[in-house]
Amino acid sequence: MTAQERTPAAPQGTAGWFDIGLPPQKQVLGFLYAKWAIGALRGLVEVRAFDALADGPRTAAEIATATGTQEDPLYRVLRAVAAAGVLAEREDGRFELTERSAGLVDGAQDGIRDMFLFTSDPMLWRPYENVAHALRTGEPAFKAAFDTTFYEYTKANPASGAVFDRAMQQNSYPGTDAVFEGFDFGRFHKIADVGGGRGHFLVDLLRNNPGTTGVLADQEHTVAEAKPLFEEAGLLDRVEIVPTDFFTAVPSGCDAYFIKHTLHNWDNDKAELILRRIREAIGDDADARLLIVENLLRGAGQWDIGKLIDVESLSVLGGRERSLAEWDRIAGAAGFTLANEPVAGDIALLEYRPVQP
């Protein structure tokens, strides 16, 4: 079935945002639910209320003692979060974790605590106070709020940079795993993970494909912390760790160049420049491949979480999410042509081959 033949369903629970007993012209006020819920959740995460519930149900008084908070305001916020379906409030007055809140416990398996703290952090919240700035100027609202770019801000503010780094380690989305099912990475002898961070994905890739070697290519301060990860996995002899400015040059000699959740951080000109550097690294190897993992947007009027993520790309980073036509446009300008049939509407793996002169 092609992407065009698929009819995406409305997101589950979407009607709930509008079902607030108001006439249709006022129902968008239902989106305020998200503001209230996010504020309540962030407060509980910051004081580690979810950690206090890790060993079982507790009353608000017990949680307050464990977290150094005041019982009455704590109870009111716990009650609200339970009403939103994230915690369970029992008849005996105790609160307990649910499947939805278990991941907010520090150190939880497949946890999302750091990811939640990052995405609700003021550095990502304040730009939304002035999205109109991005609309009027085309400039990220982040720059108007902080007088610098996002990446320069995280470099200059180590605490914020640390939150960002921890969040990226938890930035796992089921749709990403799904696109790798059935994809044969083993057909490539040497794979470069461009913008691969500290190498968590490359470790998994090499572990699952024993005949493959890898190159981790990212900024110097990022890859500086990668070696212990590969040592612990017993993979240091199968990887090259190369400090890289992908706007300037990308390591050559690989038969696949993999770039995941990175190009959307940049506008079309910068994304095309990165792809041009990859094309230069490929050279005359007609069998080499460019592998892009990103959101692939659906068509006009269709529900797509990527279209909401695109507002963050616009407002915070100055980047963008893209449709297949947009990906083909910038990849084509860089010297690539599509070699597979990715499906729109979620995370997709786009495989491109180099166009030969």
Image (cartoon, rainbow, N blue to C red):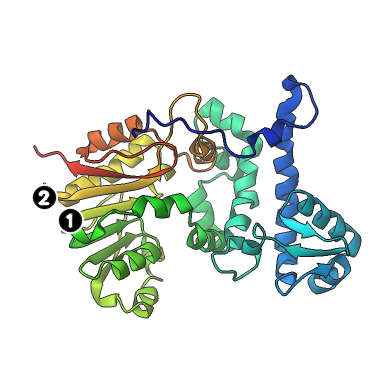
Q: Quadrant of the N terminus?
A: top left
Q: Is residue 173 visible?
A: yes
Give residue 106's quadrant in the image. bottom right
The local secondary structure at tag 2 comes to loop
The local secondary structure at tag 1 comes to loop
Q: Residue at x 59, y 63 (%)?
A: 159
Q: Nearer the viewer, residue 162 or 118?
A: 118
Residue 161 in the image: state x and y as whole percent. Answer: 53, 60
Task: Give the amino acid type for the residue marked by disc 1 in the picture.
Answer: Asp
Position of 17 with respect to 262 (left or right) is: right
Q: Nearer the viewer, residue 310 or 340?
A: 340
Residue 93 in the image: state x and y as whole percent. Answer: 88, 63
User: In the image, is residue 273 above or below residue 69?
Assistant: above
How crowded pointer 1 is (Cα within 10 Å; few <14, some 14-19, many 20+) is rated as: many
Q: Nearer the viewer, residue 38 or 85?
A: 85
Position of 22 with respect to 312 (left or right) is: right
Disc marking residue 153: none
Position of 161 with respect to 236 (left or right) is: right
User: In the image, is residue 236 above or below residue 87?
Assistant: below
Q: Which residue is mark 2?
A: 285
Q: Quadrant of the C terminus?
A: top left
Residue 201 in the image: state x and y as whole percent. Answer: 37, 62
Q: Residue at x 88, y 68 (%)?
A: 61
Q: Which residue is mark 1?
A: 255
How crowded pointer 2 is (Cα within 10 Å; few <14, some 14-19, many 20+) is rated as: some
Task: Give the amino acid type for the residue marked by disc 2 in the picture.
Answer: Asp
Residue 178 in the image: state x and y as whole percent. Answer: 40, 52
Q: Which comes before the other along the chain, label 2 or label 1?
A: 1
Q: For the image shown, how many numbered marks are present on the structure?
A: 2
